[in-house]
Amino acid sequence: MHFHIVDAYQETDSLLHRTDARVKVMLAFVMILLIALTPMGAFGAYVGFFAIAMAGVVVARVDPLTVLKRSLVALPFAGAAVSLIFTMPGPSLGTVPLLGWSLSAAGVIRFASIVFKSFISVQFAVLMMLTTHFADVLWALSALHVPRVLVVIFSFMYRYLFVLADEALRLTRARDSRSAAIGGSPAAGRSIVFRAQTTGRMIGNLFLRSFDRSERVYQAMAARGYRGEIRQLDTPPLVLRDVAVGIIALLLGLGLTVASMLFR
């Protein structure tokens, strides 16, 4: 193998790392749900949720810059709502020079709210992944009675993603070795049309190889007793420390959401 997936998990002996994976998965889900329920324009509540996420970073003793950088993945998707700035009805803040588009105050507030809510929501997910092994996340999902087929799909996706990436790397290396140009001659085979055709063939080849490999893997697993589920050990009981961590974080998030609804 020439390609290796780097696990997002960061090893430290913190309280959050020792907390049961079921509690962390539930907290991440509930926090994201509470942020989604927070009214638009409740920037004070957004600051509170951000403070909770940063408090978790301090408790976990992980790099806060890592959490912030990885949370930026939400911004391009939240940017799809930029049209709200110009289409929401309401008082105008001015017009865009040259274009003449009117800036809506309500649209700016809604767009900013979507950006902040998306950014902070991803922070909780990133924090969970930094403090929990992916195998423990799968175990927690199974223990929380998430549909078995989804857990199996997540498991195989994570296990075999590096295999597909390695296969794509070999195809790329083969393409490069067959696309060399003789010194002094024009750059043959480097046009956009040629690259597009080659990339299309590589994608098709990768799909066929992946399909064929998946069939062989499934047959090998079925021959060894696989019946559509992943065997796991018995679920251990929750300890008081894990319950306390979950209740404290839940009350803080619920309090922020309720306060934002009452004092909007």
Image: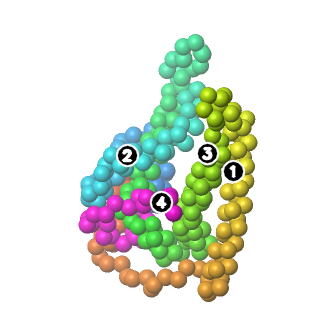
Type of residue at label 4? His
Measure the alpha-carbon separation of dots 1 and 4.
21 Å
Residue pointed to by mark 1: 202
- Which is nearer the eye, 227 or 245? 227
Residue pointed to by mark 3: 176
Q: Position of residue 45 (x, y in %)?
A: 38, 45
Can you say whether 166 is above or below 145 in the image? Answer: above
- Which quarter of the rendering shows the C terminus? top left
Q: Residue at x 59, y 80 (%)?
A: 229
Measure the alpha-carbon separation of dots 2 and 1.
35 Å
Is 12 contained in the magenta span?
yes
Of pointers 2 and 4, the one earlier in the residue sequence: 4
Query: Dot 1, how many residues are within 10 Å of its Cα: few (below 14), some (14-19), or many (20+)?
Result: some
Measure the alpha-carbon separation of dots 3 and 2.
36 Å
Residue 4 image label: 4
- Which is nearer the eye, 57 or 196? 196
Measure the alpha-carbon separation of dots 3 and 4.
21 Å
Residue pointed to by mark 2: 68
- Which is nearer the eye, 167 or 221? 167
Q: Residue at x 35, y 49 (%)?
A: 66
Q: Going by the picture, which residue comes out furthest to the front? A: 183
